[in-house]
Amino acid sequence: MRTFLLAALAPTALALTAFSRVGAPLRGAAHPRASSSVVAAAGGPLSGAMPSGFELPGGGRAVILFDGVCNFCNAWVSFLLDNDEEGQFCFASLQSERGRELLAACGRSPDDLSTFVLIDGEGFHTQSSAALRVARQLRSPLLGAAARAFEPVPRVIRDSVYRLVANNRYRILGRDSDGAEPSCKLRAAADAELVAERFL
């Protein structure tokens, strides 16, 4: 049911799915002690080229940087793993050392959690544009149709919707806390080894 809801929300807020988080943090996620409120302002450029000589980690696959303590985001990553049969994406939490390094390489603040970030062969992308690019690359008719429908919408409108959800994402499905019962499949011992190579 939860997976269905995530898929259903994608057409109206693909960028928002970038914050899907279910259960405890994924591999490499840290537990920030700061306030649970999310910074609304972008912590740097919203898109651009990567530095000269930059090479995609994870065997050249696109990288998704996500908020590792957000249950909504964790659910979204689980959804991607289920629907990315070709293994196009690898992942790193924004709070992890590798995630912070990649944020800095994008020219963004390594402490910024206001948006997930997609890094691919064309550079880096954030907010609704990043979500649409991810949706286009998955072999899902629903997500592909949603991406095509929302791409003509002016970015200022798309990003406004994205930020509305992003700024309230902890209220939607909550955030992980130390000692929580594993509810995300990525934390299960049986699954951890299967997906470990997808996480930086």
Image (cartoon, rainbow, N blue to C red):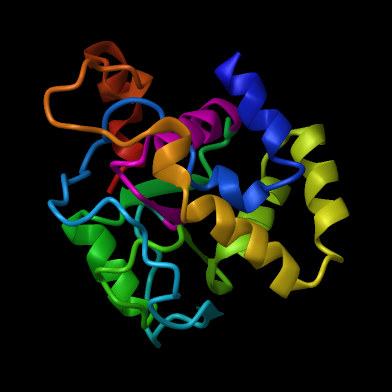
State which quadrant residue 10 falls in.
top right
**Number of numbered discs on residues:** 0
Residue at the location (43% across, 39% down)? 171
Q: Where is residue 190 shown, x and y percent of the image?
A: 27, 11
Q: Is residue 63 magenta?
A: yes
Q: Is residue 30 visible?
A: yes
Residue at the location (72% across, 50% down)? 136
Q: Is residue 41 magenta?
A: no
Q: Where is residue 43 shown, x and y percent of the image?
A: 38, 77
Q: Is 180 above or below relative to 164?
A: above
Residue situated in front as seen by the camera: 94 or 112: 112
Q: Is 26 above or below relative to 12?
A: above
Residue at the location (37% across, 66% down)? 39
Q: Left or right? Give the position of 181 relative to 184.
A: left
Q: Is 17 above or below relative to 120?
A: above
Residue situated in front as seen by the camera: 145 or 43: 43
- Image quarter (top left, top right, bottom left or bottom right) of the N terminus: top right
Q: Left or right? Give the position of 144 relative to 176.
A: right
Residue at the location (16% across, 51% down)? 32
State which quadrant residue 112 falls in.
bottom left
Residue situated in front as seen by the camera: 166 or 99: 166
Q: Is residue 21 visible?
A: no
Q: Where is residue 34 shown, x and y percent of the image?
A: 17, 56
Q: Left or right? Give the position of 70 relative to 172.
A: left
Q: Where is residue 103 shown, x and y percent of the image?
A: 33, 70
- Residue lying farthest bottom? 52
- In the image, the segment drawn in magenta is 60-83
